[in-house]
Amino acid sequence: MQSSGHGGDSDAEIFDAVPNYTDEIRLALRVLQTSDERDHQAVMAQIMRAGVSDPNLALRLYQLIPIVWARFFLLAAGLYLPDEYLVVDRRTGEYIRDRFSQCELYGQIQETLLPEVARASREQRDRVLVRSPEYDAFRQHLAAGANPSNLMLAPPILT
């Protein structure tokens, strides 16, 4: 999106337009809070039927919402959580490093979920938590007797 400069300036300013995905995040969250389905393709189909029409966005929401959701609880438990994550390039199979702090969608998910965490029932909260690979790793380490303050999780891998 371009805007002309002030007072007859000839230089154009270019503003970044970032899509707002709040509605899609809420739709996907409702599916994740209510679905007992374990098959990821079936859950993706539910998210798309709920109104998230872009399959790539549905996939990212399916992956990122549980990570963000779990991170609220894991941070409260004193865990170190990496800012980095890896994305598998589907064409080459190579890993691409990226940062949550630089991911606009991740930031929008955080902002949208923060009030939702407080409103969720225990059942809704747990349905989302069990989908998080980081929360799963945390639970496994606790079951093995680890102290939460001594844990440091590896970056999650998104496909």
Image: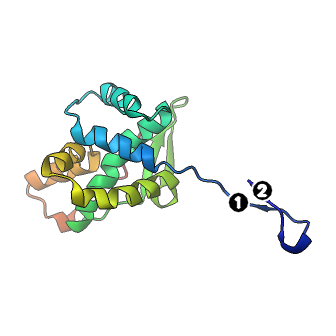
Name the element at disc 2: strand
Q: Residue furthest bottom?
A: 7
What is the total number of numbered labels drawn onto the structure image?
2
Amino acid under disc 1: Phe
Amino acid under disc 2: Gln
Circle 1 residue: 15
Question: Residue 88 appears at what percent x and percent y?
Answer: 47, 38
Comparing 74 with 37, the one in front is: 37
Comparing 34 with 130, the one in front is: 34
Instruction: Say which quadrant the C terminus sits in.
Output: top left
x 88%, y 74%: residue: 7
Q: Is residue 54 left or right of residue 132?
A: right
Question: Residue 31 appears at what percent x and percent y?
Answer: 29, 37
* Disc 1 to disc 2: CB gap under 8 Å: yes
x 23%, y 67%: residue: 76
x 43%, y 41%: residue: 60
> Gap in Å between the C-alphas at discs 1 and 2?
6 Å
Question: Residue 78 appears at what percent x and percent y?
Answer: 23, 68
Name the element at disc 1: loop
Residue 122 in the image: above or below residue 148: above
Circle 2 residue: 2
Q: Is residue 61 left or right of residue 15?
A: left
x 29%, y 53%: residue: 69
Residue 9 in the image: above or below residue 47: below
